[in-house]
Amino acid sequence: MSTGLKLDGESVDYISEGGQNFWGRHSLFVYNRIPKAWFSPLPHTFMELGYASPGTELHVRILRFWTPEYRTYETWFLAVDKYGDAIQILGQRKDQRYVQFVFTVSKCYAISKYGCGESDSYQNWLDKPILIAVGMGSSIREILDTITIPKYWFYFISKNQIPDYVNLCPGIFLKFVNYTKKDGQPFTLLILSNDSGEEIAISLWKECTDIPGRFNRSAIENACSPAVLAVTNVKVTPIAGTLRLGTTCVSHVYINPPIGDITALIERHRTNQTSKTIFGPTISLHDMNQKTHSKLLEKTFIVNTSVMGFTFTDTWYQVICPDCKTPTFKQGKNWFCPSDGILKSPSSIFKLVATIVYQTDSMNVILSDNVAQKLLGARSDELITEDNPDHRKTLPLLSEKIKRLPIKMVVRMTKTSTRQHSLHDN
């Protein structure tokens, strides 16, 4: 016995004969009608898209945007769907301003009536050949924010993978170094350290640093240590037999993005730093004290020493805003940030100066938050006792336990110093 399903636009032929199923165009017996979409599902995710795919509705979140340096008539957006897949969305020429007006970074949208094309090598910043083109003929509407669509997207690689492919270079922030190109243009060198202790240098060009929302040097320098930076779309250039890394017009620099990879990197860094052995020649405190200010400025020294005591000016810790990293103010039982208002979860950092000694010489050094954590074996928020009215001006007893213990330190005098040094995260 055979059964057939009529093919008339919305239905398809289906024949069952002798227990075997096969497709055909028989329509002698019509028992039911099955929508064609059931058998040919239309794409609703990025992974299902291909060249010339129909513009069926997609739900996306816009994460970042950029305009290429040499194709100013193009504006690109990085979008992610609920499965964590990313794709590039293009608005160009007469549609460019419309798309720039419609899309807002971090918001979610339903998109349909778009085109799918293949990006060229200059346009393609993802390991995905398909792009989505939208314009005034597209249907774009904002939808409610949802936790099902990720708020961040990165593709992390290791330093060893850089010669083969680069899309993003994550690392722990160490320092900035200012340089000048041969033509007199200034640029900044960003020094990172990965979880293996290897240093990674990235040249930060004006195409990235001059655009608000892509780079914030002050926020990076004032971030609680360790600060993890995620630098996107880094370009690899072979120069004099070595590979140099530099930002592009697409690059964004993120500070501590709240994703699992970053949390794991911070924990590994803290663990490694706790047990890290400092190598290199040492200098005595006596010899350092004999040097002039110019001989010490912006130089790093390794010293054998011990902590004699801790001092502070007003309070031994400071409460800061976790977003903008600025000092906050007590407002009743809450902490208030002038920029962000009442804070639900403020952060705190140490504000300590240590007196270090060796034999008959001594020196005062400003402790970074990370160094203070390692010396005291705890974070500042773990030592704060709100029930004690004098706790802000009384050091925890824990500080007495490490006095006079022999330790090795890395000391560096910064430009803001006179004869006072900074003890950095080593």
Image: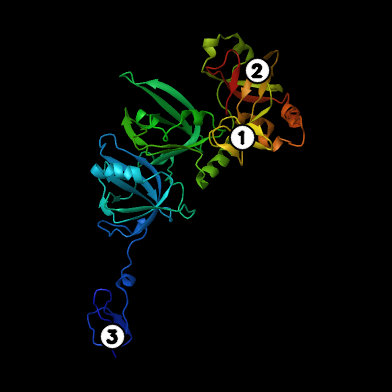
Q: Is residue 263 left or right of residue 62?
A: right
Of label 2 and label 1, which has the lower sequence position? 1
Q: Is residue 367 above or below residue 198?
A: above
Distance of mark 2 from mark 1, alpha carbons?
Answer: 32 Å
The residue labelled by disc 3 is 30
Which secondary structure lies at badge 1? strand
Residue type indicated by callout 1: Phe
Between label 3 and label 1, give the one nearer the viewer.
Answer: 1
Q: Position of residue 97 (x, y in %)?
A: 29, 41
Count neighbours of disc 1 (C-alpha within 10 A) and say few if under 14, some if 14 to 19, many if 20 or more.
many
Dividing the picture into quarters, in which one does residue 25 lie? bottom left
Q: Nearer the viewer, mark 2 or mark 3?
A: 3
Quadrant assignment, res 263: top right
Q: Which of the two labelled residues, at mark 3 and mark 1, occupies the earlier sequence position? A: 3
Reading the image, the residue beneath label 1 is 336
Residue 310 left/right relative to 424: right
| Left or right, residue 270 beside residue 209 | right
**Mark 2: secondary structure:** strand
Which image quarter is the C terminus in? top right
Percent x, y for residue 277?
A: 59, 31
Judged from the image, the secondary structure of the residue bearing numbered disc 3 is loop
Q: Amino acid at mark 2?
A: Asn
Residue corresponding to mark 2? 364
Residue found 46% across the figure and 51% down from its top: 150
Counting labels gives 3
For the point 31% across and 69% down, the residue is 40
